[in-house]
Image (cartoon, grey):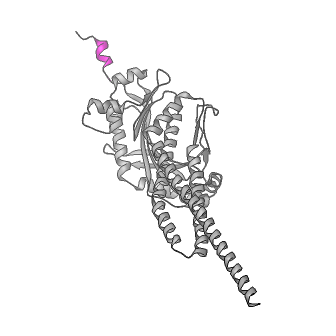
Amino acid sequence: MTNESDIVSTISPEIASGAILAYRLFDVAYAIDLGKAEETWARTVRTGSSRGRLTTTPAKAVAFGVPPVALGLGTVTLPLAGGPVQATVTARLYDFGVVSIALRVAVADLSWVAFTQRLNAVDHAVGLDTALWTEPLDRVRQGVGDALIRPAPSALEEDYVVGVVNAFSEPMTAEALLGRLDLVPLLSGEQRPLSEGARRDLLRHRYSYYTDDLVVLTWDRAFIYEPRGDADVIDVLEVANAQLLEMRYYDELLDAELPRMYDLVEATRRRWALPGARRFADLARRLYTMVAEVTELTEKVDNALQVTEDVYLARIYAAALELFRVATVSAAVDRKLAIIRDTYTALYDEAHASRSEVLEIIILVLIAVEIVLAVVR
């Protein structure tokens, strides 16, 4: 016989408060002068900005390398199948040239199934309507003006969706949540049942610090249960996505540069010796400048978030970097930089050898002239 308590325990609790966050990140420039961006935004748009910081974590434990600038961009209406909903739009500017646009939809008094459906609907809507991203991005570009250093928008983007629950209709522990709620449809976006192997993979990266909080990460989505309203995990995930975007940009930049570099080296070798030595030196300086610029920016990206003492956030940050394959892309960038460095060294040596040969020829010519003059005299 089934008693009443067993029936109640199988009923999914309602979500009392939470949010759905959709992110789209863009590489817009070589770098952004954040101080100038704040000043220009306040003067032209006449709304406030703020510098990002982790809300509950001590600065000595985890901190931004250079705190990003957060800008408010008002609200937009998302046309969902169940009716339109309002979303708050914000932007965050990183000094290494990335702008992150976020749409936040507040939720309250929803069942778990309705919350999952709402998140999937938001993800679908923001994926179809590109104007939801391009319009606020254009406002940011115009609002910060020449704070964008060497603006050069790329076609690369990164997106991410986060479902956040701050309170259920009843107290919940992480263990109870995993036992009573099916996170797989929310994390996968799939309507059909998944295999046991696929379900295990989706739920593999899950973390808790207290008994009543939970973070589950996947490649393009995350679920966060945080009763204290702490946004630090969300900020960490955004930084990891920004790092991935920037590393992908430099990986593609170097992919395009390597064949061009080989062609320039071959063309330079076919030139006459004296101008060729100068061209070798000019090409070497160009490659050295590129290596220096890319190295400087990748170091900024690597140091975007500094994790020292907060073990919990450090685990989540490391897991996000692993899931997003940031280390893999970064290693590819390092290998291509090493090829360019080796080419620079070879060009420098070749230029030096060419100059030495020219000097030897000049010395021999002068000696020959001296001999001829002596004979004539």
Position of the N terminus, as image quadrant, is top left
Q: Position of residue 91 (x, y in %)?
A: 52, 49
Picture quadrant of residue 348: bottom right
Q: Position of residue 25 (x, y in %)?
A: 47, 49
- Magenta range: 1-11
Rendered position, 256 above or below 53:
below
**Front-lying residue, 317 or 24:** 317
User: Would residue 69 be visible to someone looking at this image?
Assistant: no
Rendered position, 250 above or below 360:
above
Farthest residue in the top direction?
Answer: 1
Q: Residue at x 48, y 64 (%)?
A: 262
Residue 83 belongs to the span the image colors magenta:
no
Q: Residue at x 37, y 39 (%)?
A: 119
Question: From the viewer's perspective, is 353 left or right of 14?
Answer: right
Residue 4 belongs to the span the image colors magenta:
yes
Q: Position of residue 304 (x, y in %)?
A: 57, 43
Farthest residue in the right direction?
Answer: 377
**Front-lying residue, 327 or 315:** 327
Farthest residue in the bottom direction?
Answer: 376
Report the label total: 0
Q: Residue at x 72, y 83 (%)?
A: 371
Question: From the viewer's perspective, is 360 left or right of 93?
Answer: right
Position of the C terminus, as image quadrant, is bottom right
Farthest residue in the left direction?
Answer: 1
Q: Residue at x 33, y 32 (%)?
A: 184
User: Would residue 203 be visible to someone looking at this image?
Assistant: yes
Picture quadrant of residue 176: top left
Question: From the viewer's perspective, is 220 left or right of 94?
Answer: left
Rendered position, 157 above or below 9:
below
Q: Position of residue 48 (x, y in %)?
A: 61, 49
